[in-house]
Image (cartoon, rainbow, N blue to C red):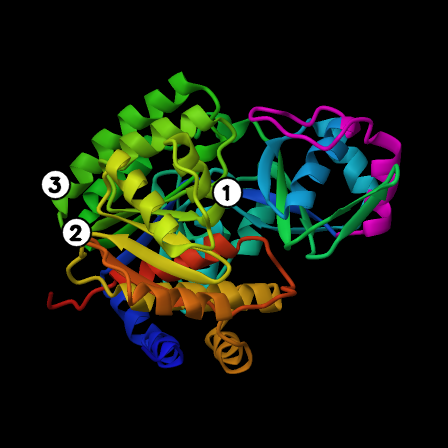
Amino acid sequence: MDHRMLYQSALDQTEADAARCAGGHQMVLGYTSNLDVLLEWDGAAFARIADEYLKDAPAYAAGDRIDSMEDFARIVTHFLAAGRGAEVDIAAPVCEILESRFETAYALGGTCAQGAAALGALGFPATAYLTDRSRAVCDLMDRPGIALYADGRVAPIGACASGEPPVRHVILQYPQGAEVKTRGITYRAPASNRMILDDDQVHKTLPIEPGFLAWCEEHASDIRVLGISGFNAIVDLQVLTDRLDLLTAHYKAFRARNPRAAIYLEGAYYLNPDVKDLAFERLARSVDVLGMNEEELVEHAARLGRRTDTGNLPSILEALQRLLSRCPARGIVLHTADYSMYFGRKLPGVDLPKGLALGNLMSGTRARTGRYGTKADCLETLETQPLSAAGVQMASALSGIRTGEHLVQLVPTLRMEQPRCTIGLGDTFTAGMLTAFIREAAE
């Protein structure tokens, strides 16, 4: 396969696909949004924090919270040294200290909010439901063609701001090679990544207006794909069970009105691993596709007793097989720094290679530029960035592997070793992947 031609073809189809969306083949996204407070990486500032507060060896256990600067130093250094990202609860007083220690900027947070903004930048219309409709969030998300459901109606973003203060998530992004030297030990980041530190009680309950669910059911015939996310901040299993009872009934009613519509669940780092297991096991029976990154797949597989070698394609395929057996959606989309992949049953009428390629291109453009890319931005990414060598090797290895009854599609990414931005790349990829489900009106 000529991967560059696939990228160009996916980009060339954006205007026609956007016109189909405007003509009654909607993309609808929910459910959570917030304001990201971005801490600009400052190695000297972090080293001072480590010298002052890192009393014990770097460490993290599931369920840990950051209630002090000692917790912050211990947990963040642990993930930095592994080149990994994570999402951890943080107390408001610690947030205030961090904002005084680092330069800060503000950005849009939440998979559905970022996905809608990314689609809007590329010229796609979409409708979203947000939990945080503060003026700060709405201003960052505002794009032509992007509408919100709020207070019983769908309206342009500018008319939907709530007047409430924003829900804040503190983001610390560290670069590949970042070093922390303290007490004679050097910790070095083997890859760029980010920490998401949540001072957020709103999303512990995932509030969703019943009117939005009713609107989706009423307009189901006009919806081609429903992109859902935001379950990861729930920590109480009973709260999750209540939400899943409500939503699985809703998805059943939605499908009854439009069996051809797709439901796409994008994962995230879950604060409670038991919540993750329950959410995926129950939602997989209602959705078509489970989306996740490499770290999430490894964690899912480990919970199922499988150690995954992310550099070995058969090991990855085995992990996907195990997860799909436990969580029987129609397929899984895996997105990584080097490739994206679909694994599962055939999806009639869905252009999977196009979605994988456009998702990679939109995500790569955000990594390169730090913003949601226009078509011109995406074209520049395609013209200037190399295909991931590791991704190309994975694609080559796939041709020699028997995958049984499962369809496997793999597209190498456009790889940047030193991205300008690592925040929201998975959310931006997901936005592009949703375009795979846009179909001809005559189908």
Which residue is most to the top? 238
| SS at mark 3 in the image | helix
Q: Is residue 57 magenta?
A: yes
Q: Provide residue 39's location: percent of width, then percent of height.
A: 73, 48
Give the residue drawn at x 41%, y 19%.
Answer: 237
103 is higher (above) or lower (below) than 211:
below
Extreme-front residue of the structure? 400
Residue under label 3? 256
- Quadrant occupied by the N terminus: bottom left
Instruction: Mark 3 vs mark 2: give the one in front.
Output: 3
Tell me which numbered mark, 1 or 3, is placed earlier along the sequence. 1
Q: Residue 59, percent across and down?
A: 68, 30
User: Seen in the image, is 335 located left or right of residue 104?
Assistant: left
Give the amino acid type for the residue marked by disc 3 in the picture: Ala
Which residues are drawn in magenta?
Answer: 41-70
* Distance of label 1 from label 3 (alpha carbons): 28 Å
| Residue holding disc 2 | 221
Amino acid found under the numbered disc labelled 2 = Ser
- Report whether 248 appears left or right of 15: left
Mark 3 or mark 2, earlier in chain: 2
**Secondary element at image label 2:** helix
Circle 1 sits on which residue? 33
